[in-house]
Amino acid sequence: MTEQIPVTRTTDHGTAKLMPDVDRERAWLLTVDGAPQSYVDLDDPAHLEFEYARRLGYVLDGVADEGLPLDVLHLGGGALTLPRYVAATRPGSRQDVVEADRGLLELVTEYVPLPRGSGIALHTADARAWLEAAPDDHADVLVADVFGGSRVPAHLTTLAYAREAERVLRPGGVYLANLADAAPFAFLRSQLATFAAVFEELALIAEPGVLRGRRFGNAVLVASHRPLDTTALARRTAADAFPARVEHGAAISEFTGSARPVDDADAVPSPEPPDGAFGIG
């Protein structure tokens, strides 16, 4: 086995560092340009260390009956934490991972390799370009966790992008996105308006402190044409070590306010996090 020492490498889009966790024998933390990006435990791929990843995991758990295989498209790869989670909790799933940074994928697969027969296919491409070329009704779930540095790229925030996501999902499919913002939430509100224009059902998962505007933080957007089991989701997120709220229905409309869907010509990236917002140590 490769000796567990920190590895730093300049990749296509930044400086990536893999650091072993002293408390877990085969666990690694991935940072990109100093910001924590992914955490993987090779001995326990169902372990989700980051709060936002657990929230995505809670949604994935409720998309279909326990253990049932799913076809999942991941935009953004990182250390492949969620693809590994789905492979472990839903054996037989077919998954595509689209990551623009080839050097990052090479680093991750060298030091934190995927298990044989994982059913995970890796693609080096721009997320939106790959999505636009994908066939209709391709996936049960689409997970968007794409950050250029520490910001969601502008071209993954628009109405045209949301329509492509809806096209690639099957009729009962679920869209998930990891977003980040702070009060007054211009970015987050615009994303809710954009996806409300395409999908019938929306939910938002975030810590109460973030929703109240007290600090910058992650928010998970869930969109679908089918009713979402927000009661079960709220129960699980509230019981987490870092409790979160699930907003849906009228609360989403109220939060969105007068925000309008985003056109390609007007798109901007998510806001730059304040210093230390996602730091470690």
Image: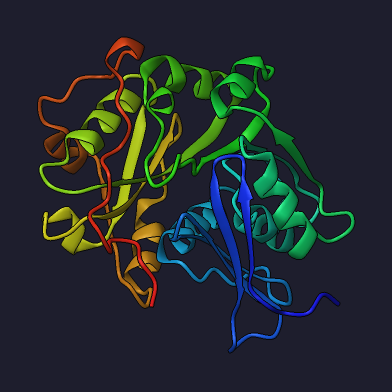
> Residue most toward the right?
116
Residue 197 screen position, x and y as percent: 32, 19
Q: Is residue 113 visible?
A: no
Which quarter of the figure is the C terminus placed in? bottom left
Instruction: Give the image location of residue 258, x and y in percent.
Output: 10, 25
Q: How many marks?
A: 0
Q: Quadrant of residue 151?
A: top left
Q: Is residue 174 visible?
A: yes
Closest to the observer: 6 or 81? 6
Report the colour scheme: rainbow
Question: On the picture, is 201 further left or further right than 60?
Answer: left
Residue at 72% x, 72% y is 42
Q: Residue at the spot x=17%, y=54% of the render?
A: 211
217 left or right of 124 in image: left
Q: Residue furthest top?
A: 265
| Residue 73, percent from left and from top | 64, 37
Residue 158 vs 207, above or below: the answer is above
Q: Position of residue 65 (x, y in %)?
A: 63, 54
Q: Is residue 170 left or right of residue 198?
A: right
Residue positioned most to the bottom: 23
Q: Is residue 261 left or right of residue 67?
A: left
Which residue corresponds to the image point at 25% horizontal and 62% vertical from the top-left? 207
Vertical side of 6 occupied by 92: above or below: above
